[in-house]
Image (cartoon, rainbow, N blue to C red):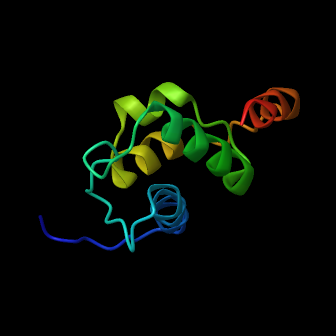
């Protein structure tokens, strides 16, 4: 599959998080999280890091429904600037 580089700032941030969590060199915007070795526990790590970095709510189910960087970024953009609920974030971080 051809590598397609991130185009937007959000795609770049998500791709960096995915590469770090999945321990791969780079993640293209059409690479499937689960095909790269991702699973539910790693998806939780991605969500936690993304919420902290992007300062917006990233539903865990979105990782399963939108499992490429491009699809997830577009979905998050469509949600608008839904800010992270600090208490929820702290609870999620405590679980990690």
Residue lying farthest to the left in this orientation: 1
Q: Quadrant of the C terminus?
A: top right
Q: Nearest the camera: 72 or 60?
A: 60
Which residue is found at the position 50% from the left and 42% from the top? Answer: 42
Vertical comparison of 10 with 58: above or below: below
Vertical comparison of 17 with 38: above or below: below
Q: In this view, does 34 lie to the left or right of 89?
A: left
Across and down, in percent, residue 75 comes to 44, 40
Q: Nearest the camera: 55 or 80?
A: 55
Q: In this view, does 42 lie to the left or right of 65?
A: right
Which residue is found at the position 27% from the left and 56% from the top? Answer: 31
Across and down, in percent, residue 36 comes to 30, 52
Vertical comparison of 52 with 28: above or below: above
Q: Quadrant of residue 57?
A: top right
Q: In this view, does 37 lie to the left or right of 95?
A: left
Q: In which quarter of the image is the N terminus?
A: bottom left
Across and down, in percent, residue 61 comes to 48, 25
Total marks placed:
0
Across and down, in percent, residue 71 comes to 35, 46
Q: Nearest the camera: 8 or 37?
A: 37
Which residue is found at the position 60% from the left and 43% from the top? Answer: 45
Q: Nearest the camera: 84 or 21?
A: 21
Vertical comparison of 49 with 86: above or below: below
Q: In this view, does 15 lie to the left or right of 57?
A: left
């Amino acid at each position: 599959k051809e590598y397609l580089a991130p185009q937007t700032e959000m795609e770049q941030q998500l791709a960096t998080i995915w590469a770090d969590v999945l321990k791969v060199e780079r993640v293209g915007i059409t690479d499937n999280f689960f095909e790269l070795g991702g699973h539910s526990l790693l998806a939780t790590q991605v969500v936690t890091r993304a919420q902290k970095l992007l300062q917006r709510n990233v539903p865990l189910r979105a990782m399963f429904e939108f499992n490429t960087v491009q699809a997830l970024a577009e979905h998050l953009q469509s949600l608008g600037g839904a800010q992270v609920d600090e208490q929820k974030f702290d609870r999620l971080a405590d679980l990690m």
